[in-house]
Image (spheres, rainbow, N blue to C red):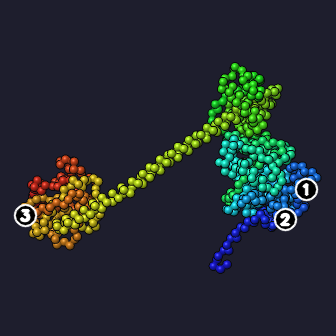
Amino acid sequence: MEGGRQPPQAEILYRAPSDNESVDYRIRAAPNSLQEDPDVEEDIVYRITPGGRITVAQVETCAKSFSSYYGVWGETAWRKMAQCLPDSTNNVLVSAMAEDDRQVGHCVVSQWAHGDDRVWWITQLLVLPAYRNQRRATRMLQTLTLHYDIGKKSDQNDFVGVASCQPYTICAILRVFGRGIESIPSKPDWEKSPSEHAHAPLESSKCAPLMSAAPVNYIHDATLRPKMLQANTEFLVDHTEPDDALRRVVHGMNKQMREPWEWLFGDLAEGHEYLCVLDFRHDPNYKMERQFCDRSEIPNEIQPVEEVEKSSTARSKPSSQPQNSVDYAGIDQYLLEFPGSCILDPRISHLTHKSTNRANSKRINEAKMLLAKQRQTLPNIMGAKRIPDQLRQAYRAGSFPLPEYMSSWRAFRDYAHEVFESDLNVDARLLILQAIHFQELLEDDESLRRGAERKRIEEERGQEKKNIKHMKMEQRIPLRSLTTNRTTALQRAKFLAKSSASASTSGIATPNSQMKPKLPSVSRLGNPRSAKPPARTPPKQLQSAKHNVKPSGPALGYAKVSLKSRARSEFTPISDVNKPPRTEYQQMTPPATPVQPAIAANTNFETPATGSTLRPETTSPQLFFSDSSSVGSGRSSVPMRRFPKNSGHILNRAKVEGVALGMRGRKAS
């Protein structure tokens, strides 16, 4: 390629439902050193065959597989299979083909329009028994999303539906077109608010218009059960295998969740099928990773229930349940001593013995009422739950201690049947205990939800208060910064004006002239408003006195002396030194008071003795004192000086005249 440019990546083109092209797809999992993809060994390919290319041999193969492993069609299998491929729809056959071109699974899809929406209905989904539990059904459905534009058009809605009595089929639909079986809520939660759960199946009332437009007869003529996700399709089939699959799914879900989880689609009546319709929108970031339904804790044909209980209990962590408030040991002892209390009929629940307390009697009666509604499903739900610790400790101390690995209700049931072989009420007693535990878990879950809701509300209120406080601070900051900037600018302007006036009138430069002028700043250790302005000399008097003034060391202090007693100085007059005037000392503590009228210059000015040492300017806090300090408390590093530089006091030259003369006289001697 010229200029090192790479060719643009080809855009993936998805086909419309009316497309008539057959394509094979190889779907492989990510490389994993611990588990090999079974499709690699068998070299499984997933073939898309549009309705116009489906052959009679393919129809016969699908009908034979369906009749052998799903429902018995007999001699009319081919004719019933043809009814699933009506001419007025876009039909698709997805086949899972092994390396010897042998079909190991198939999926039949019919697509029709409902107004501006499209409906994709899975009429059949089947995998041969030897190839199950390896995600073949999921990948056949995934092939539809790879080949067609299902869920990818922004101006059109796509609904994917299925009516099946096989729970594994429902799980595969939820995995590809939803977020998996773990994303759907428990049945009681869904019944409270069906529309609040994302990726959950549509209500039966919303499914009815889509099914009424179906060209497939058994879908069009199906009767929907109100407030339930079931349809009466009059499909009579043996439910032994579907019921076994349902027990595995429910067991696996309840093993992962602390609260009881109920199958959303309810108990399947005779001639009915589960109804699952999803509003599908393609998400390229969704990886279709399975999380619950295929875990090793779920028993299957390869791993029996006993091995699952041992392995899962050994790996499980101690239960994080709260302290039990239910007296399970006392209730179990009461049911053992009074067999009449094990009768599950709630109509005779008032016949309780006086030996039990009111709380336990109430829980037993509530358990019997719950069993009257959910006697078939409750043992399956509670089979995966851990038995209460109190009940476990009671049976650990008996003559036949409960083994450590038997921690679930399913394992405890087998243990109880061995220990109480002659007890006819063992099943009823265990059902009552499970129902009490079921109700307690629901109460704990509801309490946790209320606590989480209260915490969320408190956090929202706290965040709202922080936002209000932050808004108030933002409203104050501009006004405060504007006032500060204005005050600083005024102080700086006053100081510069006063400094320039002082330098032009006095003509006396301060020491350390090599230092650059500093910006004005206000010292926190001194009070600028209390400092008196320095005395200034008028220009006329300055001209007559400037030749008589000689610098002698730093300007640390001045004494008023007579010209006659002035000693000869070896220093050059300041007027002859070509140096710029300095303003460091005035800049450190700018006066805040207005400029006072100039005072006549003192011609009897005398500089300190030549023995004084030049000291650099310092900003040490030790040289600054407040005006409230007493006169005698002032200290200075210069001998005979009581007040430090930049203090709030101005030295009185008349009072220290004698001291200065005495010092000079000693130097002269």
x, y percentage for residue 496? 25, 64
Residue type at the position of mark 2: Gly
Which of the 4 image quarters holds residue 387?
Answer: top right
Q: Is residue 14 left or right of residue 67?
A: left
In this view, 458 is above or below 521? above
Cα distance in 3D space between marks 3 and 2: 129 Å
N-terminal-most mark, 3 or 2: 2
Q: Which is in the foreground here, disc 3 or disc 1?
A: 1
x, y percentage for residue 235? 85, 47
Q: Is residue 486 left or right of residue 52?
A: left
| Residue, disc 1 | 78
Q: Which mark is residue 52?
A: 2
x, y percentage for residue 79? 90, 56
Please rate how many residues cluster around mark 2, counting C-alpha atoms within 10 Å: few if below 14, some from 14 to 19, many from 20.
some
N-terminal-most mark, 2 or 1: 2
In front here: 484 or 588? 484
N-terminal-most mark, 3 or 1: 1
In front here: 185 or 10? 185
In front here: 392 or 281? 281
Cα distance in 3D space between marks 2 and 1: 17 Å
Q: Which mark is residue 302?
A: none
Say which element carries label 1. Answer: helix
Residue drawn at point x = 70 percent, y = 40 percent? 260
Report if residue 522 is visible in the image: yes
Say which element carries label 3. Answer: loop
Q: Is residue 563 left or right of residue 5?
A: left
Cα distance in 3D space between marks 3 and 1: 139 Å
Image quarter where the C terminus lies is bottom left
Please rate how many residues cluster around mark 1, counting C-alpha atoms within 10 Å: few if below 14, some from 14 to 19, many from 20.
some
Residue type at the position of mark 1: Trp
Residue drawn at point x = 28 percent, y = 57 percent? 522
Q: Which mark is residue 563?
A: 3
